[in-house]
Image: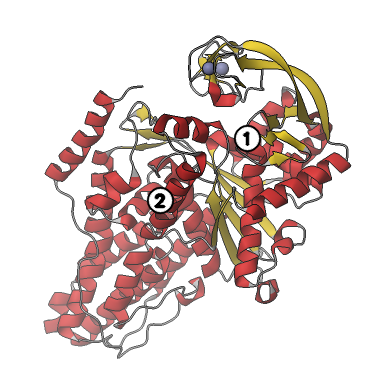
Amino acid sequence: MRCLKLEVVKDLKYKFPLPRPVLVTCGLPYVNGPCHIAHLRTYVPADIFIRFLRKLGQQVVFICGSDTHGTPILVKAEAEGLTPQEVVKKYHKHFVELFPRLGIDFDNYGSTDDPLNHNRTKEIILQLLKNGYIYGKQLKLPYCPTCNRFLPDRYQKGTCPYCGAIARGDECDQGCGRYLEPGELLDPRCVICGTKPEMRETRHYFMKLTAFEEFLREYLKQMDGTENARNYALQWLEKGLRDWNITRNLDWGVEFPGEPNLVLYVWVDAPIGYISSTEEWAMKKNGDWEYFWKGSGYLIHFIGGDIIYHHCLFWPSMLKGAGYNLPYAVVASGMVRVEGHKFSKSRGYVLWVKEDYLDKGLDPDALRYYIASYTGHTRDLDFSWSSFGEKLNKELVGTLGNFLYRTILFAKKNYGHVPQGEVEPDVVAEVEAVIREIREGLDIYEFKKISDAILSLAAFGNKYLQENEPWRLVKTDPNRARQVTYNCLWIAKALQILIEPIMPEKADKLHKQLFGRVERNKLLSEVLKPLETGIKLGDPKPLFKQISEEEIEELSRITLERVSTAKG
Ligand SMILES: [Zn+2]
Ligand SMILES: [Zn+2]
């Protein structure tokens, strides 16, 4: 990756930019269905994060891809009469088409069923075998005599041995949330035919997770990211780890080397998808994937709070055992609730991003802003149409949009261009404080702090405009009127740069209104620079559209109707 190896100038007060290039990944969407709001809980903040890093001059590669293996895709395929390949193809395409509509801009979006990922996974497994971290063992596992097959993971339902809740074969998803090892589930039943399975002997492979306890204890202490990731992982570690069964009796997945009847558990090849997607990026863009995975680059993983176990225990052990770099940080988001209820596709508490939002003509940037600003990154986000409407109408239309529109409209009408003026010290101090808030927010991965700071600058702009009343001054004190207008336009210029990572489409529109053309990716250091006088202003237009009570009611009605007709 030739051009990426430049070292950046470090500001010692802040963590970011890091001294060397960064690779940021997002938890891979599992492609057994369309994109929903819980996906965006991770992808939107990650996209905002990398856009801000770039504004700091940080060189960043942003990687994601489709997670394609495992039993939920097989169960879905059986239910729809499709092959697993057809299910994967359908939803992979859906995600590839959807991300750009939301301004989520990956440098590469791969797939864990790509030959690159099969090969990288085999290479890592062979490395772990060679280093003595994988061993084989005979096991008795549930086998359905009616369907004539073993019942891995979601092919069985039963009772969680820890909390007694109804659970799937690999996860207590409705109860305590624990990862369950094959054979642990009590009273299992085949999900396809309901038969009580019999136990049959079969050979499986295990990763010696217990050999990594000491290493993980040390590693987790210094791992950067959000506290929830570190603390959960340390709590699990306290309870002691068990060796991890990494194979399944299936024919959909990455084959275990030398065992044609076994594939690897999906949680082995899914995170390796981060590496193979980086390899694909490197091939396409003439980059160097090893710089990040084996060299001195930094790795940062953005994930949902439900997959901390996999990213903070399994994944670092696999990387360490196979001789790869360890993640610098794991940033775990809080979970999602919909209209006050735990997010659930089967119960209808879901927001389908395409069907319920984008296809209704709603504003992608407003949803990005809502996700960033609704609550702290590690807290639960409770999506409701009424809170969405309130944030859109009050904050985006009423505060941000209002300030920008009034400013540009007044300046355009009275001068047509940026008038002569100088930035006032109070205004500079305000913007400097906002930049500090943003940088502190980035350092602790707190996107609400960042979006609140930006909104506070718009509120300051409104107040400045209101107090100075340039529409009066223009008749009584034209020099002062020009000065006030210049300051408002200077704040608008600052906002144009600052909103870009959160609302990229609106930043383009605002740039056009201010400068008559679109220009992207201005550095954060440009925010405090003077605004050139004499620049011809573009046409002022409101950036945001108010959403009416009736629209909100209609959208809420659709969500609640889905809940009342849901199966689950
Ligand atoms: Zn069966
Ligand atoms: Zn449980």
Q: Amino acid at mark 2?
A: His
Query: Residue 141, how many percent across, how many down?
Result: 68, 17
> Which residue is painted at 28% across and 85% down in the image?
418
Residue 415 falls in which quadrant of the image? bottom left
Residue placed most toward the observer, 80 or 122: 80
What type is the residue that disc 1 sits on?
Asp
Q: Quadrant of ligand 2?
A: top right
- Residue 239 is left or right of residue 460, and the answer is right
Q: Residues within 10 Å of mark 2 (few under 14, many from 20)?
A: some
On-image quarter of the N terminus = bottom right
Q: Position of residue 124 (x, y in %)?
A: 77, 47
- Decide: is 532 above or below 568: below
Q: Which residue is mark 2?
A: 94
| Visible residue check, residue 22 | yes
| Residue 14: % across, % down | 61, 60
Secondary structure under tag 2 reads helix
* Residue 376 makes an appearance in the image: no
Examine the rendered structure and indicate whether residue 141 appears above or below residue 245.
Answer: above
- Kindly identify which residue carries mark 1: 251
Q: Secondary structure at mark 1?
A: loop
**Residue at coordinates 54% horizontally, 34% vertically from top-left?**
306
Q: Is residue 412 left or right of residue 396?
A: left
Residue occupying the point 51% across, 19% down = 175
Q: Earlier in the sequence, mark 2 or mark 1?
A: 2
Residue drawn at the location 59% of the way across and 48% of the way down: 113
Residue in front for this viewpoint, 302 or 182: 182
In this picture the colour scheme is secondary structure
